[in-house]
Image (cartoon, rainbow, N blue to C red):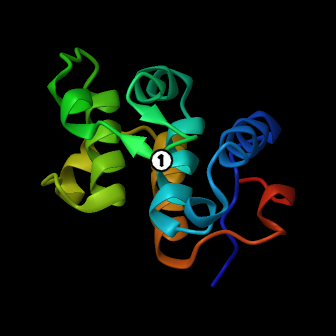
Amino acid sequence: MNPVCFLDDQHNKRYQMILKRLSTRNRAKTPFQAILFLATGNLQLMQLFSDYFFPETGDFFYQEMLAEPIDDRMIDVERQLLVQLYNGRTTLTIIEIIDQLNPKELKLVLGAIQVRMFGTDEELGERKI
């Protein structure tokens, strides 16, 4: 399996910054790694996510986040995927992902799915898409 790649150095820095705020126990959990990978790769999504996710405690108020009205269909799909990667509590089809995301966002989503499955490793931050 190929290692997961960050979109750029800024994506890596944002991910590492928030990851370090998690407890040691949560930091090692792939659901947390995956949602942070996805959220830190899109600034608009990260802004929405940061209102509902609290790294220090690991609390993610996903129901409240999903209730927030969103006009941008791409961000809506990505926020549903955040919840799907976290706990599987949304229904999102592959065709919705394909139809609503541009190639860069699709790479980000595929990377997040890979992180959810396999986690991250020390070499992750050194590679780019």
Which residue is labeled 1 in the image? Answer: 58
Residue lying farthest to the bottom in this orientation: 1
In the rendered view, does 72 fall on the left or right side of 40?
A: left
x 75%, y 46%: residue: 16
Please give left or right for residue 88 compared with residue 50 in the image: left
> Which quarter of the picture shows residue 23?
bottom right
Quick one: 57 or 20, which is closer to the camera?
57
Which SS class for mark 1? loop
Q: Nearer the viewer, residue 15 or 18?
A: 18
Indicate the quadrant where residue 53 lies. top left
At x 53%, y 68%, the residue is 29
Q: Name the side, left or right, on which 100 lies relative to 118.
A: left
Whether residue 41 is visible to the viewer of this picture, yes or no, is: no
In the image, what residue type sits under mark 1?
Gly
Q: Is residue 54 visible?
A: yes
Indicate whether 19 appears above or below 45: below
Within-10-Å neighbours for mark 1: few <14, some 14–19, many 20+: some
Residue, x 34% and y 29% (percent of image)?
75
> Closest to the observer: 96 or 27?
27
> Residue 39, how many percent across, how many down?
51, 38
x and y percentages locating residue 69 in the rendered image = 18, 16
